[in-house]
Image: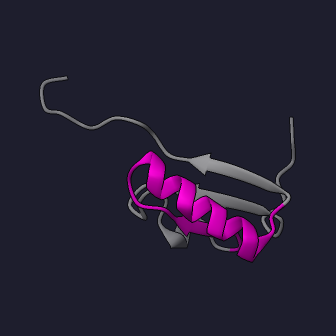
Amino acid sequence: MTDFDPKTTLLVVALESELPRDLAVGWQVVYSGVGKVNAAITLCDALISHQPKQVINYGSAGALRAGL
């Protein structure tokens, strides 16, 4: 198992509702917005500004729908 250092690991999350800032205190977190293009652009900018050793793409795919 890999140990992740909050100081050198970047968390990329689409929406703050998926990972609120108060649950990720001490971690480098960027919120990209929904979609592959938003995630790619945000990640490129964050790689330049944060220069992390590791990146975790945090979140889930899909949507909630009543009846499922």
Q: Residue at x 82, y 53 (%)?
A: 4
* Looking at the image, residue 12 lies above or below residue 48: above
For the N terminus, give its image quadrant: top right
Furthest residue toward top: 68
Relative to 35, say whether 42 is above or below.
below
Residue 65 lies in quadrant:
top left
Q: Position of residue 14 (x, y in %)?
A: 45, 56
Q: Nearer the viewer, residue 67 or 28?
A: 28
Residue 27, quarter of picture:
bottom right
| Viewer-closest of 42 and 14 | 42
Position of the C terminus, as image quadrant, is: top left
Number of marks: 0
What segment is highlighted magenta in the picture? 26-52
At a point 87% along the width and 41% down the height, the residue shown is 2
Q: How far across and down, in percent of the image, does residue 26 sit?
A: 71, 73
Q: Residue at x 24, y 37 (%)?
A: 64
Instruction: Give me the residue at 46% from left, 46% from top.
Output: 36
Relative to 57, is 15 on the left or the right?
Answer: left
Where residue 16 appears, as percent x and y from the top left, is 43, 65
Q: Is residue 5 magenta?
A: no
- Magenta stretch holds residue 45: yes
Depth check: 32 or 18 in front? 32
Color theme of the render: one colour
Residue 29: x %, y % from top left: 61, 67
